[in-house]
Image: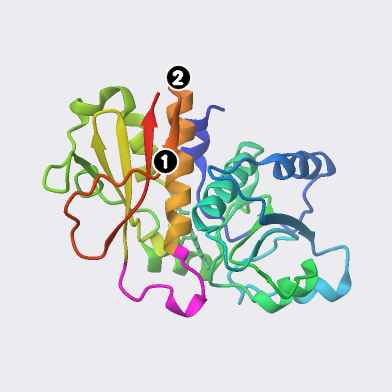
Amino acid sequence: MNIREVIMQRKSVRTYQEEIVSKELRQKLENYIRDVDTPFDTKKIRFEIIDINNNKKDMKLGTYGVIKGAKTFICAVIEKGNGYEENLGYAFEKIILYATSLGLGTCWLGGTFKRADFGKTVGLQANEFIPVITPIGYPKANRSLLDTLMVMAAGSKNRKDWIELFFADDFDKPLKKEEVKKFEEALEMVRIAPSASNKQPWRIVKYKNTFHFFLCRNKGYGKALGFDIQRLDMGIAMCHFETMINELGYLGKWDACNPGITLPERYEYIVSFTIA
Ligand SMILES: Cc1cc2nc3c(=O)[nH]c(=O)nc-3n(C[C@H](O)[C@H](O)[C@H](O)COP(=O)(O)O)c2cc1C
């Protein structure tokens, strides 16, 4: 499968077969996780695979009934206080896409899991925090009732139109597909990315060969979580954009070069990607 196919195939899986992930696939995941790359240089993230079958005590690991049947989870553990969000979003989505390419189901969980349970299992240190986890396993053919309700509540099957997300030069001018032919698919992979509650907060302004990424914040959203979940969404968008750009045969780099354009209310500049 190429990266485009993997991105198109990924969807949140909340209902799993009771079967444990095979040793072979687990080993592949472990190898991948160890070396997964991040756009910015920080080593303050670790990923732990938890096999809840190995230890009776762990059987209580809670997801409020949202996840059914999964025996294995990947936990993202970060050190509090460093700007980790885009890095984590990017790296965790890479892991999610890799698992998808292995035929495994995943589901980003930033809200509906019991942090204390998972914290105990990974041996959380005082300066550490678990922003997100994902179950890993073989998808069941039929969704549980709660899974179906979650999909409906978030409108998970819908995505915003291109015209709402991508702009030329500034936010007054929607970007036409003809203007960006070579890179169209990279933007399309951002458009279909997952995001917390399917809010799709990413906006991109193209200027010459640079794509400026902005966050359109949903007021008050995620406040109670204690971390900036919408910046994780930005990392996911960066992951989809860069991996697709690379697959199209282009290279480039991430940089902070704020174009200083007028921003609509609740928009924030995040980062820019310049094609080499
Ligand atoms: C950062 C992040 C956090 C999420 N947290 C949860 C969660 O706590 N519970 C849940 O059921 N789904 C969660 N999701 C899944 C989203 O609801 C889902 O990605 C979105 O509705 C789009 O659906 P899809 O993944 O099937 O394409 C999260 C997704 C992201 C990206």
Magenta segment: 218-229
Q: Residue at x 63, y 72 (%)?
A: 63
Position of 179 with respect to 81 (left or right) is left
Q: Looking at the rendering, which quadrant does residue 187 occupy?
A: top left
Q: Looking at the rendering, which quadrant does residue 238 occupy?
A: top left
> Residue 208, relative to residue 7: is it above or below?
above
Residue for badge 1: 255
Q: Is residue 2 visible?
A: yes
Q: Residue at x 48, y 39 (%)?
A: 7
Q: Position of residue 36 (x, y in %)?
A: 66, 41
Say which quadrant the C terminus sits in.
top left
On whether ligand 1 comes within 8 Å of the CB at mark 1, the answer is no
In the displayed image of the protein, which residue is found farthest to the left?
A: 172
Q: Evaluate if marks 1 and 2 touch, with contact meaning CB atoms under 8 Å apart.
A: no
Q: Residue at x 25, y 65 (%)?
A: 266
Q: Position of residue 153 (x, y in %)?
A: 39, 69
Q: Position of residue 232 (x, y in %)?
A: 48, 57
